[in-house]
Amino acid sequence: MEHLRTFPLPPVSLVLGGARSGKSTHAERLVAGTLHGAAPRPAVYVATAQAGDVEMATRIMAHRARRGANWTTIEEPLELDEALVAAAAHGRPVLVDCLTLWLSNLMLGGSDVDEATDELVRALDEVAVPVVFVSNEVGLGIVPDTPLGRAFRDAQGRLNIRMAERADRVVLMTAGLPLTLKDRPSARG
């Protein structure tokens, strides 16, 4: 595909990590092309977060300030498949941050998570620009003490598996350091 020559990213990447592991910053640098000190390229940011409280609003503001003016932001907490296709229409690399908040939005809204995941994976076939997803790895900690917490942890694990299967590159962030778990040549190229 044309985007493989235009953008030095695989078609689909997944950046996983725990809280404050550096996953969003790493993903932003991948998408903007600044990982190795290059001038930032314009990109599209699909935000799934909702500012439900002051702390989350502060986080959102910090992310926006860090990204700067080269980014176009699309906010979509639920219909991620549609937002992804709309974002790709800009003809620039797309960052989706993050699948974890999208999953919690779906679960709290009573949506069918498996169906929404299927729709998201199908939407990737309509996208001709690189997409980088950010997601939390929540299965490495303690077992949640509530049924909802356990259901969320399990659903997050299944979502991460589906996205890692579809991704051409998977990176695990730990202490700000990237560990490449998967890096295959594009099957679509």
Image (cartoon, rainbow, N blue to C red):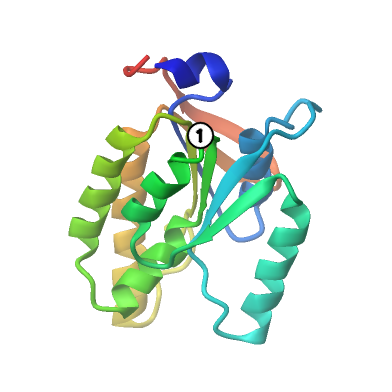
User: Residue 70 vs residue 121: left or right?
Assistant: right
The quadrant in which the N terminus is found is: top left
Locate residue 184: give its quadrant: top left
The residue positioned 65% from the left and 68% from the top of the image is 60
- At horizontal 71% and vertical 69% (from top left) the residue drawn is 61
With respect to residue 138, does 131 lie above or below?
above
Residue 133, percent from left and from top: 48, 45
Does residue 165 appear in the picture of this structure? no
- Is 64 situated left or right of 100 in this image? right
- Identify the residue at the far bottom of this view: 53
Task: Decide which of 71, 107 is in the foreground and name it.
Answer: 71
Q: Position of residue 30 (x, y in %)?
A: 63, 34
Q: State the residue position of label 1.
A: 91
Q: Quick one: which residue is furthest to the front in this view?
A: 90
Q: Residue at x 67, y 85 (%)?
A: 54
Work out whether residue 182 can be spotted.
yes
Q: Is residue 170 above or below residue 74?
A: above
Q: Give the answer, above or below, for where 42 lies relative to 87.
A: above
**Where residue 182 sits in the image (x, y, percent)?**
45, 27
Q: Residue at x 65, y 43 (%)?
A: 28
Which image quadrant for residue 80?
A: bottom left
Residue type at the position of mark 1: Gly
Q: Is residue 43 above or below residue 99?
A: above
Residue 146 rendering spot, x and y as whole percentages: 35, 83
Image position of 82 (left or right of 13):
left
* Number of marks in the rendered image: 1
Near-viewer residue (65 or 92) = 92
- Could you tell me which secondary element the residue under label 1 belongs to? loop
In this picture, residue 39 sits left or right of residue 71:
right
**Crowd band around label 1 with a 10 angstrom C-alpha radius: few (<14), some (14–19), many (20+):** some
- Choose between 12 and 86: the one closer to the eye: 86
* Quarter of the image where the C terminus is located: top left
